[in-house]
């Protein structure tokens, strides 16, 4: 997150680059924040948010333009188990709605929640299997 922007402004940022009007940006960003359960923190700056809240704002920013694929690098890495579970539930919901989630993680419990597991060692694929 950009530290000088509020949660709402951070989520609006990709919409600015998409050329969307101010009113529509506000509406879409609020919908995205609401979809990750953090609309009540829209006016807060990043330093006023917990790690889990910052991660949810980042997810809202990632989904605000309705992508078909999300790349997530250690999305639960710096979170406590409760916040990590909340983030994974958001990803589960997004995936169920048709969004492909490609995630990098060192946590096998998180990795096992996917439908496919690709394990790397020293830059080489050592395992590639369907899970579900």
Image (cartoon, helix red, strand yellow):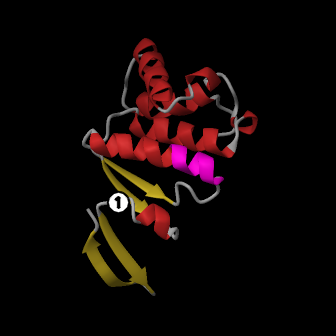
Whether residue 75 is visible to the viewer of this picture, yes or no, is: yes
- In this picture, residue 18 sits left or right of residue 26: left
Residue drawn at (44%, 12%) of the image: 23
Dominant secondary structure of the magenta stretch? Answer: helix
User: In front: 104, or 10?
Assistant: 104
Percent from the top left, x then y, of residue 2?
63, 40
Q: Is residue 101 above or below residue 122?
A: above
Q: Position of 24 compared to 7: left or right?
A: left
- Give the magenta-colored segment's residue range: 80-86
Residue extending farthest to the top is 23
Task: Using the rendered view, name the quadrant where residue 127 is placed.
Answer: bottom left
Query: Where is 107 relative to 57, above or below?
Result: below
Residues packed near mark 1 inside 10 Å, few (<14), some (14 to 19) or many (20 plus):
some
Residue 94 placed where, x, y %?
35, 41
124 vs 104: above or below:
below
Q: Position of residue 108 (x, y in %)?
A: 47, 70
Question: Where in the figure is residue 61, as x and y percent of width and height?
Answer: 48, 37
Q: Is residue 41 left or right of 23 when viewed as pictured? A: right
- When the figure is inspected, residue 1 is found, relative to residue 41, above or below; the finding is below
> Quick one: quadrant of the C terminus?
bottom left
Magenta span contains residue 104: no
Residue at disc 1, secondary structure: loop
In the picture of the structure, the residue carrying the numbered disc 1 is 114
Picture quadrant where residue 113 is located? bottom left
Quadrant of the rendering where the N terminus is positioned = top right
Point 53% across, 43% down: residue: 86
């Amino acid at each position: 997150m950009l530290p000088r922007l509020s949660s709402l402004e951070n989520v609006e940022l990709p919409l600015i680059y998409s050329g969307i009007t101010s009113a529509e940006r506000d509406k879409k960003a609020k919908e995205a924040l609401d979809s990750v359960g953090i609309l009540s923190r829209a006016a807060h700056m990043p330093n006023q948010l917990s790690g889990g809240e910052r991660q949810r704002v980042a997810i809202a920013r990632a989904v605000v333009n309705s992508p078909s694929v999300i790349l997530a690098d250690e999305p639960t890495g710096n979170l406590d188990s409760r916040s990590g579970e909340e983030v994974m539930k958001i990803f589960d919901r997004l995936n169920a709605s048709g969004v492909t989630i490609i995630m990098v993680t060192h946590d096998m419990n998180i990795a096992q929640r996917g439908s496919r597991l690709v394990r790397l060692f020293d830059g080489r694929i050592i395992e590639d299997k369907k899970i579900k």
